[in-house]
Image (spheres, helix red, strand yellow):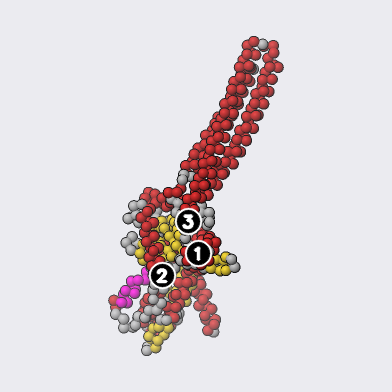
Amino acid sequence: MLAEYAATGTLLTLNLLFAGVALAIGFSLGAWFFGSATEDPAQTAHSKRQDVELRRAAERAMMASQRIQDLAKNMVCDVDAHAVKVEEFNSELQAIAENSPSEEADAVFATIGRMIDANSELHKRLALAEKQIAAQAADLRSYQTEARTDSLTNLSNRRAFDDEIQRRFAEWRRRHTPFALMILDIDHFKRFNDSHGHPAGDEVLRNVGKVLVKTARQMDLPCRYGGEEFAVILPATETQEARVAAERFRKAIESAVVKFGGQSFSVTASIGVASIGEGDDDPARLIRRADEALYKSKEAGRNCGHWHDGTQCLPVVTTLPTTLPPIAPHADADHAAMMIDCVATKSTFVDVLHRRVSESHRFGIPLSIMHLRVDDYPTIREQYGKSIAHMVLDSVALFTQSALREMDLLARVDDGEFVVLLPGSTLSEANQVAKRLQTSAANSVFPLQNQKTQLRVTHGIAELRPQETAAILMARAKAVVESEEAQKHLIRG
């Protein structure tokens, strides 16, 4: 019986001992991890003020780490002391069993009582230590967040930017997963500070930070790059999508209103974009290309965007003429053939649309399509014949192309009908394309039997919804056209 009690006491002690040691080791490793993540970040900080903030955060983290280590050491000492006590109890039980069998019962109960008290005391100490360690670990997580967050804008700071772009670059080398970088600079910010004061300038920076967060996708990482410069890392993003995103960010900043001190302000930004490519042997080259594109935007008059294709900087938005002359009936065959070649077939469009729909659902990239129908096309074909009707379609294709971006895809789906794929465009952005198209159409006329006839097109737009298929998206856009035409007939009637 005495041996059983002794074995039970020893087992209980070992369980507590191993639990305590495991707890100490786990949190010591956690302290080491967070401590290593808060090394002096001065190497990557962009400004002196950020250097000071990061060093302070690192110092607080190291202090918290030391407190955790002290708690763990004290807890281990308590467990060691308890083990010594239990060993003494075991010795007493063995002595009783050998020398005084008659006093066995009372002595055993007294010794077991002392053992229970000791175990209870140790349990309380362990519980208290666990709470203290949990609190210190929470402090460490808070300090680490502070060390990676800009205190003014609450965006990720330069250190977080450096870590993320290294991670994306490693993923590019390992899996060839594309990503893009956008760097933007608030136009004439120093002049704004001089005119309105630094508090107003800080409010502008905070507001721009909010605009970036609101405009970015969930997987993007907006950062304060330093001073009045910001950066956005765009994962899983090809060049054309990055160009669309850059223009979306530029417009969002331009349209934002900053209110401070009873006044309203607005600012603009110049943007540089670069996508990872085969020639980028390290992230520094990608950053340098985006920076060169940014300065090109400044040279071009600011409030615009440029992208670096690896050799030169080009405008994010290609300026296209708003009016183009229609194709005359006597146009040469080569010109007409060129116009036909620039328009995709329906099967090609559907194939591309399926791929874009999959990308949109996977990465959260907006996607819209526009269905176009030439007004009174059956009448034109009946009165003037197929050859003239086809020339009308070529003319419509020409001025439609003038309103589109390079990444958009125009296709002819039915006689007198077209469809346009608008990757990276929301419904609102697609409506802007439609306005440009209407402007081009309004300025385009076609000579029919010595009469100048204005070409009119009815359009319908649909933006991809969650879980929606390509077929349903196309059907919705076409339904909008039919609804518009029905309303026109009611007005005419």
Q: Residue at x 47, y 64 (%)?
A: 190
Q: Residue at x 53, y 78 (%)?
A: 487
As measured in the structure, the alpha-carbon distance from the residue carrying label 1 to the one carrying label 2 is: 20 Å
Q: Position of residue 319 (x, y in %)?
A: 39, 72
> Within 10 angstroms of label 1, few (less than 14), some, or many (20 or more) residues?
some
Badge 1 marks a residue whose secondary structure is helix
Magenta region: which residues? 335-349
Q: Position of residue 451 (x, y in %)?
A: 39, 88
11 vs 364: above or below: above
Which mark lies nearer to you, 1 or 3?
1
Left-right relation of 53 to 311: right
Amino acid at the residue labelled 1: Asn
Q: Which mark is residue 223?
A: 3
The reply to whether discs 3 and 2 touch (Cβ–Cβ < 8 Å) is no
As measured in the structure, the alpha-carbon distance from the residue carrying label 3 to the one carrying label 2 is: 24 Å
Left-right relation of 341 to 379: left
- From the viewer's side, name the closer residue of 22 and 224: 224
Which mark lies nearer to you, 3 or 2?
2
> Within 10 angstroms of label 2, few (less than 14), some, or many (20 or more) residues?
few
Badge 2 marks a residue whose secondary structure is loop
Q: Earlier in the sequence, mark 1 or mark 2?
A: 1
Which mark lies nearer to you, 1 or 2?
1
